[in-house]
Amino acid sequence: MSEITGLAFKARELDAGDELAGVRARFVLDDVVYLDGNSLGALPAAVPGRVDDVVRRQWGELRIRSWEESGWWTAPERIGDRIAPLVGAAAGQIVVGDSTSVNVFKALVGAVRMARLAGQERDEIVVDATTFPTDGYIAGSAARLTGCTLRAVTPAEVRGVLGDRTAAVLLNHVDYRTGRLHDLPGLTAAVHAAGAVVVWDLCHSAGALPVGLDAHGVDLAVGCTYKYLNGGPGSPAYLYVRHDVQDRFDSPLPGWNSHAEPFGMRPDYTPAAGASRGRVGTPDILSMLALEAALEVWDGVPVESVRAKSLALTDFFLECVAAYVPAGRVESLTPVAHEERGSQVALRCADAEAVMKRLIERGVVGDFRHPDVLRFGFTPLYVGFADVERAAAVLARTWGDGGGAG
Ligand SMILES: *Cc1c(COP(=O)(O)O)cnc(C)c1O
């Protein structure tokens, strides 16, 4: 009992010293402990009003004039530039649009084509065998289309399979299941040393920790915007193409929006310069402008502060779980070392699906990943330390009142 009081007290102190505590007011939230922002970020308060304006005024009144007057046409690049500082990229290298899956396709086929420009016959694509499934499926198709062999290996094995046959390597920055953070600088350097091109999937890192795309010389990257970037269900993804490889990026989906002169309506394709080369067709304006409003929650919020709080939150959750949950009930899959940890905690436990259902009924929302994983995502913009303590206490109680938190 004294331990519980102690951790609740500690939570209060940590919340009092939290420089990001005020950012929570920029979101629409209730008293549910929402630990699923790594799947669907919460609603930023600015979004409903913006969507209303986009629909009623921009579409309803200005109609076609909005492509110019409301900045619709340039939204993919403009919003890309808003995401850029969050992933350590200078302006002019990111376009927003399409789903992550589609951008993985563009990036990976583009990467193979780029690798072959050097003249060597490179015929292997390396992919993380533990990846979020869509990346693996797309990589398989990209391999067939480009005449490559697909080599699926664990991230720890990647360095050992790189060689002069490697064309492209597709990796996840943070593993969606375990929350493990992979070594982006080191693996990028290893891929480059082999003469190959690297594509990073940032779905579980962008908005949760510094990525440093430019600093580490990443070639291509993709990510979604509905997890830690809170863009809303199905909000468009983004594609990063580093400045000095943009001229060599040959998109496998060269739609009219990526033409150098989209309104020239020419029969022959000439790619646009710059990040716009990653565009395809008409952008999904309603979702995209909802995302633009959502990104305003980042005003004045350094991603380094977000990372510091994220690590403090996950450390504190592990501490509370260790104190409250009876021994042997759960086993953490999340690395203890900070340099290997994303912004989530994954706990393996028997009957995980039923346990998560009980948690959700009691106001703590995480998610279940097949077959036996409880996943808890910590979005530092709106999750506090008292939430973390409560989540662990409720988790302990799912095994009955004798569970240590009574
Ligand atoms: C969430 C996620 C996706 C989602 O792909 P969509 O095309 O946006 O549905 C892809 N890859 C990874 C690693 C993810 O975590």
Image (tube, rainbow, N blue to C red):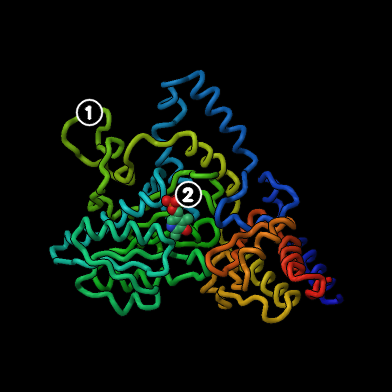
Provide the secondary structure element on which disc 1 rests: loop
Dots 1 and 2: beta carbons under 8 Å?
Answer: no
| Amino acid type, callout 2 | Ile
Q: Residue at x 46, y 42 (%)?
A: 79
Sequence order check, earlier mark of 1 and 2: 2
Indicate which disc residue 265 carries. Answer: 1
- In this view, the residue in front, 35 or 297, is 35
Above or below, comparing residue 391 to residue 22 in the picture: below
In this rendering, does residue 20 appear at all?
no
**Residue behind mark 2:** 83
Disc tally is: 2
Above or below, 281 against 123 in this view is above
**Where residue 389 appears, x then y in whole percent?**
75, 66
Q: Tell me the quarter of the image containing the N terminus.
A: bottom right
Q: Position of residue 204 (x, y in %)?
A: 50, 60
Q: Amino acid at mark 1?
A: Met
